[in-house]
């Protein structure tokens, strides 16, 4: 019964949802921090040009999930039963994950890759061994506990090119970042119709270009450091920097994906290593503030798909911080600055259906007097 409910919900909402936009954003940024007590903290922003109306959803263990096949229909793809419970963020009311963490501390998200994502060419005969691109994260988090398991398991299935007529007959163009409780990181992309899995030594990911190109670009900023520079002396004359921050002078500050990648890299690798995992959650929020897009900073013309066909602005709809040692998933929505916390240790692991939590809360303040 629960499988039929999910299948019916997917079938009736998938096309309607994609009539507006793909499920991942144009300007997402993610990174990983290490705690002194052996835990890790993952931070990520979610940007979009129209309201995704995201909720926090919880998938229990032993949930039957219908895979979307090459024909775009739930159930015609690779169907599976969840091994692990997961909590995370959805979009447009769908029972799919854009971001999330499972009960074993495997955490990650989908990020937009419209210029590079090309999925495998799956024949109708092989449809039953494939899933849709929007199901990639849900499949990973409900089936695997570690990066090594993901690397062994993902080549056994295919991600098909199932398209959505209302979205110009295109697939949702996403790539996936994952981090496990041991601190291993992996990026999964589909490039030119092939699965590409790349170990992520820096723990950072943004959008296009391909991840390997992002890594190759790091060397262009070898001069940057969080250590202050000495004054420059020329012919006995001293020229001191005008303020602190000279070591990171030249750090890109715009919203382009390669710029955000470098900024997230240097800010995350400069984080103090003496802080516990719980303390690093606070560090993560401060770093995420560097990627929070103020309304109006990115204006979208009416012809831009990320404006929903009606024009608008791209904003940071929500940000998440995940503590994969203590299994707490934190969310901050655009409409307020409150941080909401979900404790995965309190999940009803034997629930029979997906549970939805509204995050539409009023702004609250702590009174001083």
Image (cartoon, helix red, strand yellow):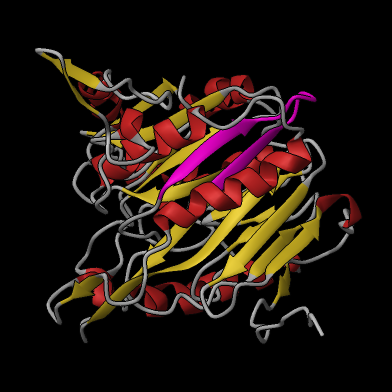
Where is residue 292? Give x, y as percent: 43, 61
> At x 23% / y 25%, what residue is drawn?
217
Which residue is at 65% across, 39% downward? Answer: 41
Q: 56 or 163: nearer the eye?
A: 56
Name the residue nearer the viewer: 358 or 20: 358
Residue 63 left/right relative to 28: right
Residue located at (53% from left, 70% from top): 10
Q: Hey, which quadrant is residue 38 in on the image? A: top right
Would you say residue 90 is visible in this rendering?
yes
Q: Is residue 31 magenta?
A: yes
- For the point 66% across and 76% down, the residue is 359
Measuring from the top left, give residue 43's x and y in whole percent.
56, 46
Q: Using residue 108 as the reference point, say whether residue 2 is left or right of it.
A: right
Q: Horizontal and vertical percent for residue 360? A: 64, 82
Residue 124: horizontal and vertical position, in percent?
34, 46
The rendered magenta stretch, by its main secondary structure, is classed as strand
Q: Name the image quarter holding the C terminus.
A: bottom right
Where, by quadrant of the figure, is residue 66 drawn? bottom right
Left or right placement of residue 326 versus residue 24 in this view: right
Residue reaching furthest front? 236
Q: Which residues are magenta?
A: 29-43
- The mark tally for this picture is 0
Which quarter of the figure has residue 51?
Answer: bottom left
**Quick one: 185 or 16, which is closer to the camera?**
185
For the N terminus, the image quarter is: bottom right
């Amino acid at each position: 019964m629960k499988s039929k409910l999910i299948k019916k919900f997917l079938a009736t909402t998938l096309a309607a949802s994609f009539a507006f936009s793909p499920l991942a954003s144009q300007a997402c940024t993610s990174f990983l921090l290490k705690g002194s007590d052996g835990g890790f903290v993952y931070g990520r922003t979610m940007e979009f040009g129209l309201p995704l109306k995201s909720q926090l959803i919880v998938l229990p263990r032993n949930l039957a999930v219908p895979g979307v096949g090459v024909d775009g229909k739930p159930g015609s793809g690779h169907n599976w039963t969840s091994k692990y419970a997961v909590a995370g963020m959805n979009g447009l009311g769908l029972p799919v994950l854009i971001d999330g963490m499972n009960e074993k501390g495997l955490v990650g998200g989908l990020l937009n890759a419209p210029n590079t994502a090309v999925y495998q060419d799956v024949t109708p005969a092989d449809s039953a061994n494939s899933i849709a691109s929007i199901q990639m994260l849900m499949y990973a988090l409900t089936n695997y506990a570690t990066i090594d398991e993901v690397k062994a398991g993902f080549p056994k299935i295919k991600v098909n090119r199932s398209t959505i007529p209302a979205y110009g007959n295109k697939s949702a163009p996403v790539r996936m970042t994952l981090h496990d409780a041991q601190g291993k990181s992996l990026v999964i992309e589909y490039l030119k119709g092939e699965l590409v899995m790349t170990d992520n030594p820096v723990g950072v990911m943004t959008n296009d270009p391909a991840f390997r190109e992002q890594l190759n670009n790091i060397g262009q900023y070898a001069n940057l450091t969080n250590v202050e520079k000495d004054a420059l002396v020329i012919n006995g004359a001293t020229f001191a920097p005008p303020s602190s921050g000279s070591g990171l002078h030249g750090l890109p500050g715009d919203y382009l994906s390669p710029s955000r990648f470098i900024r997230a890299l240097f800010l995350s690798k400069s984080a103090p290593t003496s802080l516990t995992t719980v303390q690093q959650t606070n560090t993560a929020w401060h770093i995420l503030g560097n990627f929070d897009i103020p309304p109006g900073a990115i204006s979208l013309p009416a012809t831009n798909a990320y404006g929903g066909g009606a024009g608008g602005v791209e904003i940071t709809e929500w940000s998440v911080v995940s503590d994969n040692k203590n299994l707490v998933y934190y969310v901050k929505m655009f409409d307020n600055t409150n941080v909401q916390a979900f404790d995965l240790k309190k999940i009803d692991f034997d629930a029979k259906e997906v549970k939805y939590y509204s995050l539409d809360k009023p702004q609250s303040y702590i009174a001083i007097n």
